[in-house]
């Protein structure tokens, strides 16, 4: 059986199929909806949600520093990957939205991320890997 066949059976049974993402890195306790925004609206209505909460993430100056694993030291990421500074033009901009549809019986989340936000995090991870590999004096304040 495929997901398409399963959704068809669920619909035929009179229900609205709500696909969610299973992600071990997901820190939220609510199921994360898988699909597009229009499908999310339909799923939220099917669950009886009366409101959708919006959490907004913005790029900040502090995003250019990370704590070294196992330490209280902060790493200035741009020292380890200078191209990270290209993202400074986005400081203060809205980067991601977490929508949470709430109903009496359950909650459902939907994540919207700007492409540059995703790329920023990949680049920051690369910079941190460089910093860990060097183990140098990158400490900031």
Image (spheres, rainbow, N blue to C red):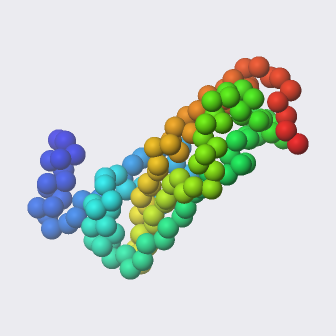
Q: Quadrant of residue 122?
A: top right
Q: In the visual, does 29 lie left or right of 71?
A: left
**Can residue 118 be seen by looking at this rendering?**
yes
81 or 105, nearer to the observer:
81
Q: Residue furthest left?
A: 12
Q: Position of residue 96 (x, y in %)?
A: 51, 54
Q: Residue at x 55, y 61 (%)?
A: 56
Q: Residue furthest right?
A: 141
Q: Quadrant of residue 44?
A: bottom left
Q: Residue furthest top?
A: 134
Q: Position of residue 97 (x, y in %)?
A: 49, 59
Q: Position of residue 72 (x, y in %)?
A: 84, 41
Q: In the visual, does 13 lie left or right of 112?
A: left
Marker count (numbered): 0
Q: Residue furthest front?
A: 89
**Can residue 124 be seen by looking at this rendering?**
no
Q: Residue at x 48, y 71 (%)?
A: 53
Q: Quadrant of the C terminus?
A: top right
Q: Residue at x 22, y 64 (%)?
A: 16
Q: Quadrant of the N terminus?
A: top left
Relative to 69, is 99 above or below?
Answer: below
Relative to 127, is 22 above or below?
Answer: below
Q: Position of residue 116 (x, y in %)?
A: 50, 43
Q: Residue at x 63, y 30 (%)?
A: 83
């Amino acid at each position: 059986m495929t997901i398409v066949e399963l959704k068809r059976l669920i619909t035929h049974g009179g229900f609205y199929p709500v696909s969610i993402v299973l992600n071990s890195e997901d820190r939220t306790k609510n199921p994360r909806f898988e699909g597009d925004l229009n499908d999310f609206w339909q799923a939220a209505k099917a669950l009886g949600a009366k409101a959708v909460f919006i959490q907004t993430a913005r790029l900040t100056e502090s995003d250019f520093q990370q704590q070294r694993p196992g330490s209280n030291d902060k790493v200035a990421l741009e020292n380890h990957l200078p191209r990270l500074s290209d993202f400074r033009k986005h400081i203060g901009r809205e980067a991601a939205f977490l929508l949470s549809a709430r109903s009496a019986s359950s909650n459902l989340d939907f994540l919207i991320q700007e492409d540059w936000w995703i790329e920023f995090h990949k680049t920051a991870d690369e910079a941190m890997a460089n910093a860990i590999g060097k183990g140098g004096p990158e400490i900031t304040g």
